[in-house]
Image (cartoon, rainbow, N blue to C red):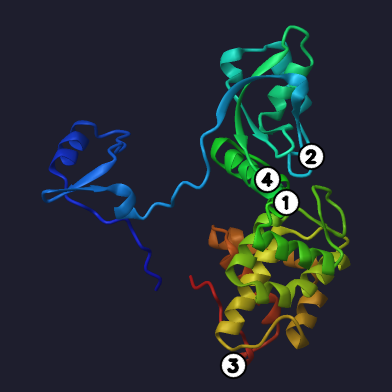
Amino acid sequence: MAVIAQEPVIRDPMRRRVKSSNPRGYIDTTETHQVGSTTVDKRLIYKWSDIEDCPGEFRMVHKNDLHVDSSYQRQSVSGKRVAHITSQWSWLACGCLLVVQRQDGTLWVYEGQTRKRGADRRSDITVLPCLVFKLDRLAKEAQAFISANTVRGPVSMLDRFRAMLIANDPTALKIQELLEEWEIIASSANSRGTTRALEALLSCAKNNMPILQNIFGLIVSLSEVGNMPIKADLIKGLFYLESYMQREKLGTIAEGEYRERLALAGPEILEKLMRETRNWYRRGGPKVLAQACIRVLNNNKRGKSRIPDIVVE
């Protein structure tokens, strides 16, 4: 059983008194811990990462001097949001745009493109408040986009994936290579030869890339037979099942009889069984999805030839 490392608990009488008087929403904002007679910086105790970048510089920048890089930014900007920002402009709501100054001196918005587009439509707005950071590589700029949007608000997985590629994220690059090998396009389109299940692919790749590579041909084949995009449940269920079978030395679903059984069932039957199994156990997750696939593999089998159930009631 994996042991999860936790931050050390250090007895601090003062901290206990403060916490007891503020039981709700208490957040420790002190920079140090008192260990005996020694004051210790929390950075050393918890081994927080060093700060690698520098603070930005505040500037009022003409809106026409601000650019948006479509190679990593969101592809679909809500027209309704832009229209609302334009018609109900508020400097309080606008705040500061986050901007990168590239080596050639040009300024590129990595957080706030919707506000910039709203300002572009108003004749009474010429300059925008910006916090400007100097970066020397596009990869760092794309990573800044990911970080800002992860902390500040939602961004689609497709847009995040594209930004991860620009940032040279190693896992995203492996996934892109795998998709290209099988001629699959990362897209929001709900059609054959595409997938939007990037979160599932990234999670599986981080867990065990060789297993994902081993079964991806089967996943593609099933999706093509069903004339449908590659879906997250199929990825997660088959990945968990293959991991289980390799761990228990039960063979592989990527070839032989097990592959034939899954192919014979087809994606529609697998999807139906996944829904039924989810409802039966009243919970979801890769383990339950894999159990649905085991029902297909165990059909008309008895005794030792059956694959043991993963989910036990």
Q: Residue furthest bottom?
A: 304
Residue type, numbered disc 1:
Ile
User: Which residue is the site of mark 3?
Assistant: 304
Residue type, numbered disc 4:
Ala
Q: Viewer-proximal residue, 299 or 292?
A: 292
User: Which residue is the site of mark 2?
Assistant: 70
Secondary structure under the numbered disc 3 in the rendered image = helix
The CA distance from mark 4 to mark 2 is 11 Å
In the rendered structure, which disc, 4 or 2, sits on the residue that comes first in sequence? 2
Residue type, numbered disc 3:
Lys
The CA distance from mark 3 to mark 1 is 50 Å
Q: Can you see residue 140?
A: yes
In the rendered structure, which disc, 2 or 1, sits on the residue that comes first in sequence? 2
In the rendered structure, which disc, 2 or 3, sits on the residue that comes first in sequence? 2
Marks 4 and 1 in Cβ contact (< 8 Å):
yes
Front disc: 2 or 3: 2
Q: Residues within 10 Å of mark 2 (few under 14, many from 20)?
A: few
Secondary structure under the numbered disc 4 in the rendered image = helix
Marks 2 and 3 in Cβ contact (< 8 Å):
no
Q: Is residue 306 left or right of residue 24?
A: right
Residue 21 percent location from the top left of the image? 19, 31
Front disc: 3 or 4: 4
The CA distance from mark 2 to mark 1 is 11 Å
Is 138 situated above or below 134? below
Q: Which mark identifies residue 142? A: 4
